[in-house]
Amino acid sequence: MSTNKGLEITKDKTQVGRAYITKLVVEGFKSYGPKRKEIPLGEGFIAIVGPNGAGKSNIGDAISFALGLASSKVLRAKNLSYLIWSKGNKKAQYAEVEVHFKNEGAFSIEAEEIIFSRRVYPSGRTVFKINGKTVKEKEVKELLSRAGITETAYNIVLQGDIVHFLKMTPVGRRKLIEEIAGIGEFDQQKNQALNELQQIEAKLKELGIILSQLEEQLKTLRRDKENLHLYREIKKQLREVEIKLLLKELTKIIRQKEELTSRLRPLEEQIESLKSKREEINRLITQKENLLTQIESQLSPYREQLGKLTSAEEFIKNTLQDLQKKKTKLIAHREEIKELKIFLQEEIKTLKKLSEEKHYRLNQLEEREITPLREKKENLVKEIEKIELRLKEALEELSLTEKTLRELSEEKQQKEKLFQTLKEEITRLNLKLEQTLNHLRQLQEEKKLLEEALKKESGQKDLEEKLSRTKKEYEQLSEKVKRLEIQLKKVREEREATLKRIFQLETENGFGENQVVEELKKHIEGVYGTVASLIRVKEEEHLLPIEVGGGNRLKYVVVENEDVAKKCIDYLKTHRLGRLTFLPLNRVRPHRLDYLPRINGVIDYLYNLVEYDPKFEKAVLFTFGDTILVRDFETAKKLGIGIYRMVTLEGELFEKGGTISGGHIRTSSLLRESFIKGQLEELKQLLNDLNRKEEKLQKLLEQTREQLFNTQGLYYQLQRQLKELQKLQNQKKEKLLSLENQIKQGREYIAYLENLLEEKQKQLETLSKQIEEIDHKLEELNHRREELFKTLSQSGLQILKSQLKDIEKLLEEKQNQFHSLEKELLKLQNQIREKEQTLSNLHEEEKNLKTQIQEIDQQIRQLEKELENLKEQKKQLGDTIYALTEKQSRLREEIQDLKGQQSLIEEQLEELNKKRENLLVEISRIQQSFEDIKRKLPSEVSIEEPKEGERFLKKLKKELEEKIQRLGQVNFRAEEQLKEVQDRHRETKEKYQTLLREKKAILEFIREVENRKRTIFLKAFNAINKHLKEIFSFLSPGGKAYMEIERPEKLFESGINLVVKPRGKDVKYLEAMSGGEKTLAALSLIFALQRYKPAPFYYFDEVDAHLDEANALKVGELIKQYSKEAQFIVVTLRESVAYLADRLIGVTAKDGISQTYIVDPKHFEKAQ
């Protein structure tokens, strides 16, 4: 293997960070089949080898697809969905590629591993992800671009695409170097600066117009200010005259007030007299009402006392009744006790007699029956003890025998119990074995059903497709919402601009119709307004000629008829409001119009250039007559001065008599007001349309957002259903595994039960033999026990014991009889004691009843006495109450009479008060007039009647008002407006100067950006050109290759030509070069770019196909050296190139599916 020593590698730029592809993961992509496969790559030089058609180039397609660096056409597919693996009727659900990068600072994400993935579905929809998070394609490209992987993808050379770099146009070549030089940001800065410059120039133009307008307004407002000062001087004189007239009127009012006040005094005296009488009567009424209150207060305790006496009387009567009832009950109870005492005494006698009889029977039983039986029992016991002593030995043997019998019986019972337990346990184990077998059969059946269910179609695919469709619909609705929001934003911006213009016009329109005309319109029906207020000029450029042509007639007031005109004139006279000219619509005779002359420069009759209500047509025709609007003075001369009444666009007026008026003129507010009003109407209509459009868009946006919300809800619902379906399938799989484990455990348990049954059966047989041996021993012991019993029975002991038993039984009966009699006797004694105690208690109770009856008799006598006293008190109290009630009635009658007198006085007072009130109202009205006039007077003026006569003062006032009338309309806000306009002029001028400075700064910035852009570009161009020359001369010794700029003076408008001269040949066109020469030239350019700005990785697909072995080896050695700085992935068919690789990846195809494997480069030759 040869080594390269002729080319030294240097880097032009310090690489900020590195990155390389560690592996590819493909699933369902092109020839790599439906299953997920990993293709390991790594640092340095990776060569991909394999036979044609195995799928080597699909690795490059996978990288380009995942990173979004190639179209479907470049990837050799009709569209992206054709990238999905398919074979016959089989097809993958999607194609997905993951590119795993080891990040060493190249990417602007703080992660050691960056995974770019892309998935395409049959519908053509693709999904990009970065580290598992779904992102937009734009975000992928931005991240790759910052790492040096651009859309031009000069670092990826697909199969047959090597000459693309040679076929690139000169302009395309220049743009490639621009991108590598990184001067795109300068274009952005320049474009931004140009946009700002354009905005500033527009603002300068706008501010220039505004400054001109403001200067015109300043001239007008200065004249208005002078008129305002003159107006104020006359107004001051007029005010002095008016004050004197007011003083004249005020002295008249003072005299009227004094007269009314003199009439008010006697009336108030009569009122005061009647009020005194009313107060006296009120005093008497109050006095008698107080007496009435005193009587009432006296009656109140009497009535209360009477109520208490009545209540006490009722209480005593009720108490007497209760005592009588209680006494009757006590007497009845006392009689009952007497009868009960007699009965108890008889009963006690009977019980005592029975007790004596029982006592006698007890003594007889003890002496005659119980004592003899006791003696007989003692004799039998002594005889039995003698016989028992002889039989002691026999009994001991019998006891031992019986003990042995018991032990054997117990042992037998235990064995039989154990035997029975074993039998039951065997039965239970057999039953458990049967149950386990049944459960095992059920588990096997359930497992079979689960396996069949899992084999069937789960519906997951349909759900995924539905989810995909819903997501697509969601994305479409999201885009629609964005579009609607943009439209709504534009409408709102247009509406804001319209509102701004309306506000501007309303601000300019600070004038109104003539105040006098407005006054007439308010008070007189049939007044329509001035001619100027009833028309609207269509075009702003016609304002001046129409105003000149209309002249003073524009100020004429249009009215319905001559009667309305008369009312207006009378009103003007009465209120001294000056003079006006009126146009009654029923009397106006408009001028007759000729045909409009048809020569160049004639525009139209003036009346055709204004808009108006048809009902005012006569007034409009009268105002403008046959006046023609012409372009200029020359046109008027051609038409014939003195023949037509004409006006030019600049305001020169030509009368039919031949007179010409012209010069500088200031447009008044007469027509401008109506023009602005028209504009305002149009703008307000536009505003209404925009509001409706905004409302419609807002409604549509809300509907679309609602659809978006519903679609989003459906999407999440489908996602949840898919997860639930997957969860259900996982649960079924888990259950299947669980069933298999249970079946396995069941089989093991059955084997265990069968072993246990066999063991228990053996134990049962052993127990059965042991029980037979115990039965034999028991039979022998029972025979011996019978022999011992026979010996005992022949001793006579049983007869004696039988006699003893009979005696004991009889003795027990007699003792029981004795005890029974004792109990009966004791019971009788207790009854006697109880009866005697009861009798004693009855004695005491009878005595208590007698005492209670006596006490009740005493209480009754006392209460009857108290009742007589209460009746006497009630009689005396009733007499007192009657006397007070009579006195009360007399006082009420007297009060009623006094109230009648009071009502009569009130009526008289009311009548006098009405008269007084009328006088006071009149005085108040005069006082109000006095106050009104006084308010009109300055506070410093003293109230004294002027010396001048009233007629003289009124005449002087009229003269001053006529002077004000001659001044015309006065701008009262002239000073304020002048100051405002001056401030606006100053601010606008400052803004204008600021914008000029900003414009200069931006132009300077653009020049600086252009210079920096040119410097950086030329630096990159020269460096790449130098590398190109070096690399090509290395690959083609003696050959030359370089780039040249078409027009250096217009660098960014021209292209860059590539000049290639292979060794020993003249300069020729690229098209005439051989395939190998083109390849070397293209690779030289790529390596030159790489040396200037290395990309994280390079992918070359059979770039050595057209090279001979020597040149292929040179290219391989160059790649080997450059792979120290960047990752190179090379598809090659050359053994010499593959042998130089750090890692070798083999690609084969089996059954149409590509497979990859790692090959050791040292063994590559053997593998080949």
Image (cartoon, rainbow, N blue to C red):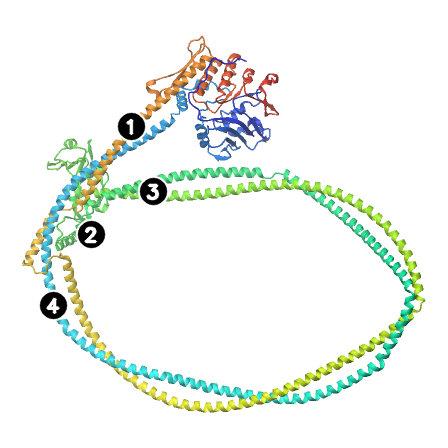
| CA–CA distance in space, label 1 to label 2 | 60 Å
Mark 2 vs mark 4: give the one in front. Answer: 4
Taking the image as shown, residue 274 lies to the left or right of residue 1141, namely left
Residue 924 falls in image quadrant: bottom left
Q: Is residue 553 placed above or below 807 in the rendered structure?
A: above
Q: Which residue is mark 1?
A: 1003
Mark 3 vs mark 2: give the one in front. Answer: 3
| CA–CA distance in space, label 2 to label 4 | 42 Å
Residue 917 position within the rendered picture, expressed as x and y whole percent measured from the top left: 19, 70
Q: Which residue is mark 4?
A: 258
Q: Secondary structure at mark 4?
A: helix
Q: Residues within 10 Å of mark 4 (few under 14, many from 20)?
A: few
Sequence order check, earlier mark of 2 and 4? 4
How many circles with numbers are drawn on the protein? 4
Q: Which residue is mark 3?
A: 690
| CA–CA distance in space, label 4 to label 3 | 70 Å
Residue 488 position within the rendered picture, expressed as x and y whole percent measured from the top left: 37, 40
Q: Are marks 4 and 3 in contact (CB under 8 Å)?
A: no
Q: Which mark is residue 1155?
A: none
Badge 1 amino acid: Leu
Q: Which residue is mark 2?
A: 521
Taking the image as shown, residue 1121 lies to the left or right of residue 234, namely right
Q: Secondary structure at mark 2?
A: helix
Q: Are marks 4 and 1 in contact (CB under 8 Å)?
A: no
Closest to the observer, 591 or 214: 214
Q: Are marks 1 and 3 in contact (CB under 8 Å)?
A: no
| CA–CA distance in space, label 4 to label 1 | 88 Å
Closest to the observer, 829 or 864: 829
Asked if one can make out residue 5 in the rendered structure from this viewpoint, the answer is: yes
